[in-house]
Image (spheres, helix red, strand yellow):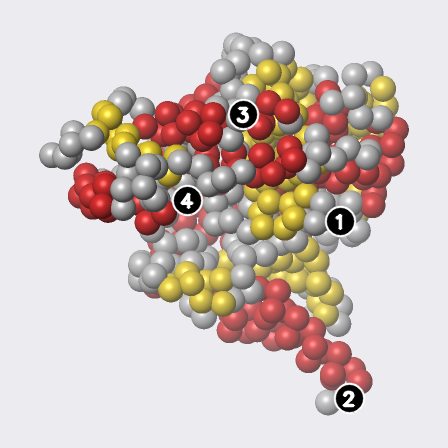
Amino acid sequence: MDEIKVKRDSRMITPGDVFYDLSESYDKGLQYVKEAIARGAEKIVTERNYPLENLEIIKDVRKEFGEACAKEYGYPARALKLIGITGTNGKTTCTHIIYELLKRSHIKVARIGTMGIHYEDVDKDYDMTTPDADILQREFYEMKKRGIECVVMEVSAHAISQKRIEGLKFDIGVLTNITQDHLDYFGSMENYAKTKLSFFDSKYIKSAVVNIDDNNALSLFKEEKVPTIFYGVKNPADVFAVNVKNVANGSGFYCNVFDEVYDIKTKLFGDYNVMNVLASLSVCASLGVDMNKASAELKNIEPVEGRFNVVNIGGKKIVVDFAHTPDGLDKVLMTAKSLSPRHLYCVFGCGGNRDVDKRHKMGSIAEKYCDYVCLTDDNPRFEDEMKIISDIEAGMTKPHFVEPDRAKAIKKMFGYMQSGDIMVVAGKGAEKYQIIGDKKLNYSDFDVINSLLKKDKAKEEYGN
């Protein structure tokens, strides 16, 4: 397909294109619009009355942009089954499980989310969990050409707010949970929750799969605007788990799916991953997947990179996890504690120029579960690293360590550990960078831990 004529990047404008002004400020917008005109834009679509000619002023430019992109590519998503997963935590893991189960059921499937876009031999990275409308529609167009039947994708609150999913109709929408995150953007939990829940409308989805145990979600989810399947453990549900047992190599339970019972074994740790499995099985059942085959295949699915990955170094275990919210950290540390470590360590920080209110809460959670806590950097961006750490310390009353250099912090805590101890390194997961100021520096928790593993192996081999 030739390059589409609908653009949001003024630098990409060619003569005859239509430029959609999605800028967040008047001054930036005016700058981009002038550049688009200079490059030959045929029309400017905007919400602002700039002192320029050839403007089409509308009320909701993001909505119009999404729909224009879908039209430009010939509405490719209509030929695909779309599963959209939203929620504060669990989106990536659910996407991963559903993708794997559908693939193993011989369904041609693609996934979109934090880990990028992947299907068949295609593997692409994007900065955003849910790409913008032009990227999504282009990818759907390519998927349709390749014969993809189903797409399972993460739908972030930002994507809903910024209308990146306009022009799409999802066959199934999944709500994993609603806990604190992104209040720097949404301002309040109420606004954040409302944004998440706005996805669960017949405008966007045909049916829903919802966590009945999440109070924030359920208290607001009073009206079923679409057919809904509920899953959970604590409350009566259509899909539920009983006899949950967490062990060192994963978890097991019996799962009731519409009154049919399956024996589940999985390599995924923790009660929160039991919920992710229930959500995934609910989706697969809705799509008509053979539940006997799906339940059997679960034991072969590896955890997502950066989600409770366990590295054993001489009897000392290090858990790498993406947990970066109060609820996420609580669940990961609770799971690590359930493995009965000799001592539990935690290394974590909070992102700069992001939700400040969650920092002290995460400090309090860390010291509740852990014997030793070390506060460190996690993408400080333009904030002073010690100010961020001080905000975390506001929720702490016990002695703890501080080492802003993340690699040094991990190595320092590892040096204190003994066989039988567990250290949780939280916040970055599979991220391969550290954002300091406007620089994105190469960094990986796994690289640091692998260096410790290599040293341990060398020590065993050479005895020094």
Residue type, numbered disc 4? Lys
Residue drawn at the location 58% of the way across and 50% of the way down: 124
Q: CA distance from mark 1 to mark 3?
A: 34 Å
> Where residue 47 sits: x, y (%)?
24, 28
- Which quarter of the image is occupied by the N terminus? top right
In the rendering, which numbered label is found on residue 358? 4
> Where residue 73 sits: x, y (%)?
51, 31
Residue beneath disc 2: 463
Residue drawn at the location 74% of the way across and 22% of the way down: 287
Give whichever of discs 1 and 3 has the lower sequence position: 3
Element at label 1 = loop
Residue beneath disc 1: 302
Q: CA distance from mark 1 to mark 4?
A: 30 Å
Element at label 4 = helix
Q: Is residue 396 above or below residue 90?
A: below
> Where residue 50 sits: x, y (%)?
15, 34
Closest to the observer, 402 or 93:
93
